[in-house]
Image (cartoon, helix red, strand yellow):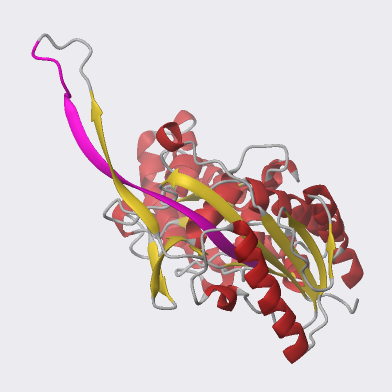
Amino acid sequence: MTEPRFLQIHTLSPYTGTLLNRDDTGLAKRLPYGGALRTRVSSQCLKRHWRSAVEKYALHTIGGEELKAYRSRELVTHKVIKPLYDRFPDEVVKALEPEIQQAVYGDKGTTKKSRQTLLFGKPEIDWLAQEAVRLAQEAKDDAEAATKAAKDWRKDFRANIKAMRDSATLPAGLTAALFGRMVTSDPDANITAPVHVAHAFTVHEEEAESDYFTAVDDLSEDEPGADTIQETELTSGLFYGYVVVDLPGLLDNLGGNTDMAGAVLHNLIYLIAEVSPGAKLGSTAPYGRASLMILEAGDRQPRTLAEAYRRPCAPDTDEAVAKLADYLKWIDEAYDTGEERRVLTRADVELPRAERGSLADLAKWAKTLPGALS
């Protein structure tokens, strides 16, 4: 295999009677494709569940506290300002807060509603908290002095926090190193995402129904019957998922640490195959695992295999895998890009140039890829 630039991950995942991802009206998200409406799960939803998973192969098991990150409009409020009230006079803290909020969130950052939801790593937050303590100490219980010190500090904020970021391996935490970060108030803080996630969609036309349900009041002395009557949407489907990892980009974001990059890929394979993007846990138990996973490593531009399902197929795993195999065979013949492949599947279908294995086999193989770049 040539030096791999990209790892492509394709999955087929089945779910029955669920509402995996809702839109603003409470209905399942949808996507028109090939003249047919499909059920969809957004990339934001998928990434959220992979990031926050709590299990054996969760991302947070890879490193220590320094790899943590927090996404919020109240990073400064909760992580920087609130702890100051235990150590310094209220008027000093109140004088510091507006300048620190605006330094982080921009000129409109003084109100929660106007702030961008930012992702900050623990090293960044710890640095901000230390700077806030230093400013409060320099003010010596004088609110006017605190205001002046904070205004002066804010003038050099971007340069100083950039210097801190440049000196740290993962200043924004592991989440930003994988999925990127955009900070509109400070473009220098932006991080390019090496993990690219497509919206998953059903390989067949949508299968949905409106579920009528009731709740009975156990203590009611009135006539028996439903106390609450509601409706919700339920869907079933076999979803095609697609993820691309820019391997040099991942290594760059991880400071060239091939061991950490390998651990990230290893765990990410497990998360993509096993973690369900499900809402309504208590009433639908939306837990499933991929019935197909294909890993491809190569040095050419990635390409989705979604075209295999432009014409909807039957909601059947064997047929869906067969269509994918046919399309992959054509891709190989037409473009000859030479990716090395590993596959996990329950279908009795041969995929071209793909070595079969268990999920553990696929994850172990993915773990070796960053080492091939060093």
Q: Is residue 196 left or right of residue 247?
A: left
Look at the image and tell me in which quarter the N terminus lies: bottom right
Q: Left or right? Give the position of 167 relative to 52.
A: right
> Is residue 110 toward the left or the right of residue 342 in the image?
left
Residue pictured at 47% horizontal, 48% vertical: 75
Depth check, front residue: 258 or 37: 37
Judged left or right of residue 170, residue 191 is left
Position of residue 41 measured from the top left corner of the image (x, y, whole percent):
47, 58
Residue 319 x, y percent position in the rendering: 61, 64
The residue at 51%/59% (across/down) is 315
- Image quadrant assignment for residue 365: bottom right
Does any portion of residue 230 appear in the rendered image?
Answer: yes
Start-end of magenta stretch? 222-243
Query: Would residue 173 be seen by someone viewing this image from the given angle?
Result: no
Give the overall secondary structure of the magenta segment.
Answer: strand
Vertical placement of 193 versus 215: above or below? Answer: below
Horizontal and vertical percent position of residue 320: 60, 65
The location of residue 246, given as percent across then percent down, is: 71, 72
The residue nearer to you, when weighing 253 against 304, is 304
* Residue 197 is inside the magenta segment: no
Image height of 16 relative to 113, above or below: above
